[in-house]
Amino acid sequence: MKKIVPILMLGLILVFACNKDPLHGETDTSDQDTTHNDSTEIDTSGTDTVGTDTLGIHYETIGQIIKLKGALDSLIVPGAEIEILADGFNWLEGPVWVENGGYLLFSDVPENRIYKWKEGTAVSLYLEPSGYSGEGDYSSEPGSNGLMIDAEGKLILCQHGNRQVAKMNDATDDPNSDFIALAGSYEGNRLNSPNDLDIHADGSIYFTDPPYGLPGRETSAFAELDFHGVFRVDPEGNVTLLNSDRDFPNGIGFSPDYSVCYVNYTDYWNPVTVAYPVEEDGSFGEGNIFFNAQSRLSDGPGLPDGLCVHPSGTIFSSGPGGILVISAEGEHLGTKKTTQTTSNCTFDSDYSHLYITADGYLLRMSIVN
């Protein structure tokens, strides 16, 4: 059992002691050198040091920053450390910043819960159930995954167990497990388990649909689709298949001008980020490999998973070792090594912090806004 920083409510959550499933990007690197000789270690702090936020709160820190290119300096606050905001969870995902309230929401997928973190207060349970509304056990990962806030301030969720993209019916400051389905099927067949999403400027929701939430995952007898797709649901509720050429689509995000949609593929044999041009009708043009993480697999545990895009066009993507910082031109600038299998990340509203979900940890780092 891990401690929680700050302390959670009564009843700590047990943490898996075993390795994560390969679909989460876990690779055995115990006998490998995890630092390339072309890198510079900016910060080699361990968990015995502390960070201080603007309210004077001290947090333990973890990991280090590996600089590969000088351009990383324009994105990282000098002396910044990776702070541990909370830990002791099962498998965290889908962080989203709620501007109206100034707090972070994040999913604990196996536990079917969403938690809330706000500076100066203890982490609290925000919503349960979050992704599976049925009775009894469904799968090992039944809960919500990716989360977003739409233009109306409503919480949008990728729900594994309910196999849909949904909107929480109630306001974010009055959460309730009352959901409105936005996309649950394609051509009469139920989706696999919507994983991650982003919202286009026109209000359309783009989302990925791998099998991680199905009982048995990619071999599930419950699957009604014979592919893992990337989809779009427009404001009228029409669901369109955008791409199904690759397995295990995962993290997804738009370029600042919405002309490109980046999709991470959590495939050990082909761990790539693909850039798809977004056509005028919202469809995808022919994608090209924007970044290939194959050469970085020895850097540490993890594969391409969640991502977020900075206003500069820089992509912050989970991958081997932690969070990879990739320029708009596809150049790997450096890695925020978390020491954990890292799932996802997001910014706060003024882009002064990057929030990271990494296995059972909620982490934060100061960036240049």
Image (spheres, rainbow, N blue to C red):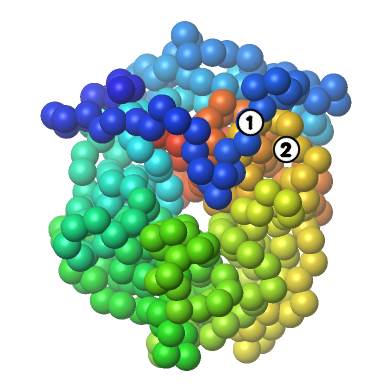
- Total marks shown come to 2
User: Which of the two marks, 1 or 2, is nearer to us in this view?
Assistant: 1
Q: Residue at 54% of width from left, 85% of height from top?
A: 240
197 relative to 98 in the view: left or right: right
Mark 2 Cα shell of 10 Å, populated few (<14), some (14-19), many (≥20): many
The circle drawn on residue 142 is none
**Which secondary structure lies at badge 2?**
helix
Residue at the limit of the structure toward the right, as seen here = 38
Q: Is residue 369 visible?
A: no
Residue 10: quadrant of the picture:
top left
Residue underneath mark 2: 297
Residue underneath mark 1: 28
Q: Residue at 80% of width from left, 40% of height from top?
A: 295
Quadrant of the drawing holding the N terminus: top left
Give the CA distance from mark 1 to mark 2. Answer: 10 Å
Q: Position of residue 82 (x, y in %)?
A: 52, 26
**Which secondary structure lies at badge 1?**
loop
> Which callout, 1 or 2, points at the residue further toward the start of the chain?
1
Residue 190: quadrant of the picture:
bottom left
Q: The disc labelled 2 sits on which kind of residue?
A: Leu
Q: Residue at 68% of width from left, 41% of height from top?
A: 325
Q: Position of residue 169 (x, y in %)?
A: 21, 71
165 relative to 70 in the view: left or right: left
Q: The disc labelled 1 sits on which kind of residue?
A: Asp
